[in-house]
Image: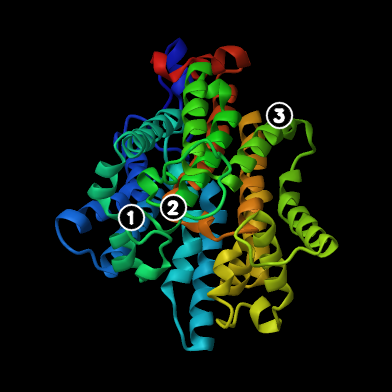
Amino acid sequence: MMRSGGRDNFFAYPADSVPTSDATFRVAPALVLIASMCFNVVLAFVNAHVMGVPTALVIAAQAALTAAALGLALLAWKPQMEASIALLAVFGLFAVFRGLVMAQPDPKLLSDVAIIPIFMMLGMASDDRNLGRTVLALHTIVFAVFLLEVVVPHAYSSLLNIQEYYIKTRGNKIDQFYNTNSDLFISATRPGSRLFSFVDWPRSSSIFLEPVSLGNYCSIIVAFACSCIKRLGWTSVAYLMITTAAMLVGCDGRLGTATCVLIIIVCVIGPLLPRRTAVLYLPLTIAFVFVLVIGAGLEPGSDDFPGRLAYTVNLLRSYGVAEYLGFSNELLGKSMDAGVAYIITTQSLPGLLLIWAYVGWSGREDTPEQIRFAHALSLYLALSMMVSFSFLSIKTGALLWFIQGALQSGSARQATRRFANPNQDEKKVLAPTERSLWAR
């Protein structure tokens, strides 16, 4: 029902959206998102100071948060969620069929990809006008923990004892850690040269407990900030970009830094490109990597970007029909260092194509925000898939898909506003979202 009078008409919502007066859908999606990204750091603290945390508790916590996200999304059902439900159903059916064929059911393989449509729907269920505030609140938490880690490193390591947490909950062995005397993650003190050689402290992890996820998080924040400048305002964008740059240096994210630079570029040129061209990022990236590795004679083995790319290419070239159909676990362990191979191994090649169609083709591109984020999202995933499967982690994946879902839900309401208020020009309609969020 539309409220009367001037500015209130701006807040009119369409029939398929949840009323913003309902506090549940103003706050609950954001709380589930933040909890999904922070629960590991809470469990690490519990493991270090309260009780030993078994692997089952970690699995149960993630399952509960994922279920909460799905439940909230279904309570705020919108027709645009249909594609996400269909994708989730396909994932579920394939997981059951794969488990029966191989007599090795593995719920983890389903949970890895289920977060994509579920957190997309959670973003759609939220009020996209709170998206900026949600990301800023979350970012402030991440940056505050990062500062604690950098300024008082001994307090951070003793509070969380990350090494012990991963040994108890992930099955890691003490000899896998580069520095067995450190309480930090395996790669926090990796040997060899650093990208930012002027920094001599261990690689930072913040709430994510390990540096790679912090680098992934930085890429997602840069994508959001560059896509939504008008929504955020320049003060908030500056805050996000400056603090993110500091965290990139802290985690020494090589891929993260390169990805952030490329994201800035594609956010500039994305709106100038034909619609739906974001779907080309993955096939073009795979083709480029194959040509580069084969043409330059790159060899796997070194823990750097060329070595990782060569590893991915060699692994994919060794796949047979069973691997491409998703019915072999022989190379499952090896595929974890090559995200595109991991998706093929666990979901099949048709499954990878379906996921990519969902990512790059099914989304709306009605607004500059949506277009820029579609390009940034596709680029981030394409690059990440070449070297790791870490993009599937709920610690960062929840935020990525939540943002995409919230941006997707915004266009329907904006179109409804224009229909309901045909005399309002676009500048007047968008004015409230162009102000800095810090000024509210």
Q: Secondary structure at mark 1?
A: loop
Q: For the C terminus, which image quadrant? A: top left
Quote the CA–CA distance across marks 3 and 2. 36 Å
Name the residue rendered at 40%, 17% in the picture: 438
Q: Is tag 2's residue or tag 1's residue first in the polypeptide sequence?
A: 1
Q: Position of residue 78 (x, y in %)?
A: 48, 46
Q: Secondary structure at mark 2?
A: helix
Q: Which residue lies most toward the right here?
A: 295
Disc 3: which residue: 268
Residue 374, above or below 14: below
Name the residue rendered at 78%, 31% in the picture: 272
Q: Quick one: 293 or 174, which is closer to the camera?
A: 174
Q: Secondary structure at mark 3?
A: helix
Quote the CA–CA distance across marks 2 and 1. 8 Å
Name the residue rendered at 37%, 51% in the picture: 209
Total marks placed: 3
Residue 371, above or below 50: above
Quote the CA–CA distance across marks 1 and 3. 42 Å
User: Disc 3 residue type?
Assistant: Val
Q: Is tag 1's residue or tag 3's residue first in the polypeptide sequence?
A: 1
User: Disc 2 residue type?
Assistant: Thr
Residue 182: numbered disc: 1
Q: Are marks 2 and 1 in contact (CB under 8 Å)?
A: yes
Residue 189: numbered disc: 2
Query: Is 424 left, or right, of 433 in this rendering?
Result: right
